Image: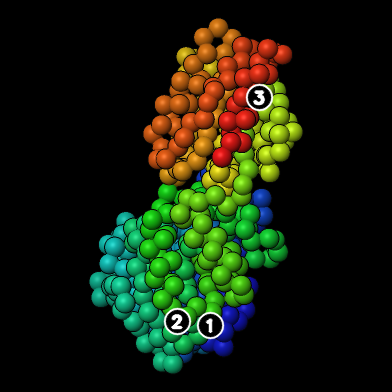
């Protein structure tokens, strides 16, 4: 797919609709795009390559867009293989090509491309450096840990375009038109979620620029209502609440815990909770569960005890939250145990390792199946969760 971003900037990326798991863990029902761009001025710059899965299509797009010209530069914003996969082949095909990247990215290159001679083929840039292509000048902004340490962002001063690396990316392909925020949110919290402070640093740099367009490495090019996208990134990277509501995540073995979780959702709705969402951690998409936990201000975890611990899907969920720096939330706990309930103890210990988590009482303990006698404790937990 080739299309104009501006007069001299063209999109030359590709859609991957055959991939089932992005990074071997994230379900992508509509696939994912690998975005690449070409700037044709007095000098020609390729802005990132694509994953080896889609090399043939990308090379066709590149050669077509070049219209017989020879590229001078390959700007590498991020060394992850889905973006830098064709770097070595580009250097082989174009002997005069120079790779422009951060010093840390240049250090990484031999790790990915054994046998490629980078001697004299790289230009290391740092914060504020520029590269003149003619009427277009690229200004480089370092963005370490958004979400790898070598990441940088480019700003085209002429057309006011930001090449944002993985920032502002989303799951899905460009050929499938869909609402941006849902898959962008799931992408953000699972890819960049741990690095809110670093994303904030990048947002502060972008705030000093006149930005008319954002070109990410995944997902659509953003040209209109940029304050909406930037505002969501600001909320997400500050770990603030986007949607007032309660997310209930449960891990149930034989259905008793699931029944208790659904009953809690019913009680909360009856008591006027603005939004209640429920996820079965054994079956639902883990990445979406992580997304919902960050999106809402309150969380209830409900899990069965298992081997004097907690049922593994819940352990996995809480481990994911810890990895992604889950914080500043109110959490309620429901445990189930037939003879020796241990789930609450384990979940509490895991939650206490996270920053700014308030565990809201009382803990509800179910014995095998929820009974009428359990309802007062359920009601009390619901009231505690709804209290401001």
SS of the residue under disc 3 = helix
Residue 275's spot in the image, x, y percent? 68, 43
Q: Are marks 1 and 2 in contact (CB under 8 Å)?
A: yes
Q: Earlier in the sequence, mark 3 or mark 1?
A: 1
Q: Residue at x 31, y 77 (%)?
A: 128
Q: Earlier in the sequence, mark 1 or mark 2?
A: 1
Residue 207's spot in the image, x, y percent? 44, 73
Residue 325 vertical position relative to residue 126 in the rendered view, above or below? above
Pair 1/2: label in front? 2
Q: Which residue is mark 1?
A: 9
Q: Quadrant of the C terminus?
A: top right
Q: Left or right: 268 with respect to 98?
A: right
Between 39 and 139, the residue placed more toward the observer is 139
| Residue 156 numbered tag | 2
SS of the residue under disc 2 = strand
* Mark 3 Cα shell of 10 Å, populated few (<14), some (14-19), many (≥20): some
Q: Which residue is mark 3?
A: 379
Say whether residue 95 is visible: no
Q: Residue at x 44, y 92 (%)?
A: 135
Pair 3/1: label in front? 3
Residue 22 vertical position relative to residue 63 in the rendered view, above or below? above
Residue 34's spot in the image, x, y percent? 55, 64
What is the image's colouring? rainbow
Which residue is at the far top? Answer: 339
Q: Residue at x 59, y 66 (%)?
A: 228
Q: How many marks?
A: 3
């Amino acid at each position: 797919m080739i299309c104009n971003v501006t007069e001299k900037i063209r999109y030359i990326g590709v859609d991957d609709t055959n991939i089932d798991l992005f990074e071997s863990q994230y379900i992508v029902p509509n696939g994912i795009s690998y975005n690449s761009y070409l700037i044709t001025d007095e000098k020609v710059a390729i802005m990132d390559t694509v994953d080896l899965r889609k090399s043939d299509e990308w090379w066709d797009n590149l050669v077509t867009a070049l219209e017989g010209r020879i590229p001078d530069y390959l700007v590498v914003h991020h060394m992850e293989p889905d973006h830098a996969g064709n770097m070595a082949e580009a250097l082989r095909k174009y002997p005069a090509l120079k790779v422009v990247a951060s010093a840390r990215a240049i250090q990484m290159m031999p790790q990915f491309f054994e046998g490629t001679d980078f001697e004299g083929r790289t230009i290391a840039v740092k914060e504020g450096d520029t590269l003149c292509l003619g009427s277009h000048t690229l200004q480089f902004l370092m963005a370490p840990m958004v979400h790898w340490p070598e990441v940088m962002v480019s700003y085209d001063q002429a057309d006011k375009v930001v090449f944002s690396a993985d920032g502002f990316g989303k799951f899905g392909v460009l050929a499938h038109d869909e609402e941006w925020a849902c898959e962008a949110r799931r992408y953000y919290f699972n890819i960049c979620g741990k690095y809110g402070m670093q994303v904030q640093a990048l947002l502060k740099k972008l705030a000093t620029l006149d930005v008319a367009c954002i070109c990410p490495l995944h997902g659509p090019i953003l040209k209109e209502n940029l304050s909406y996208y930037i505002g969501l990134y600001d909320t997400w990277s500050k770990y603030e609440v986007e949607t007032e509501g309660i997310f209930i995540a449960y891990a149930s073995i034989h259905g008793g815990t699931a029944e208790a979780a659904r009953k809690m959702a019913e009680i909360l709705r009856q008591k006027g909770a603005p939004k209640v969402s429920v996820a079965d951690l054994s079956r639902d998409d883990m990445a979406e569960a992580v997304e919902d936990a960050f999106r809402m201000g309150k969380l209830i975890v409900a899990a069965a005890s298992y081997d004097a611990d907690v049922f593994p899907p819940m352990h996995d969920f809480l481990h994911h939250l810890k990895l992604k720096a889950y914080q500043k939330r109110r959490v309620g706990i429901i445990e189930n145990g037939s003879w020796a309930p241990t789930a609450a103890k384990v979940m509490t210990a895991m939650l206490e390792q996270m920053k700014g988590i308030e565990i809201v009482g009382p803990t509800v303990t179910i014995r095998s199946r929820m009974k009428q006698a359990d309802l007062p404790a359920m009601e009390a937990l619901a009231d505690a969760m709804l209290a401001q």
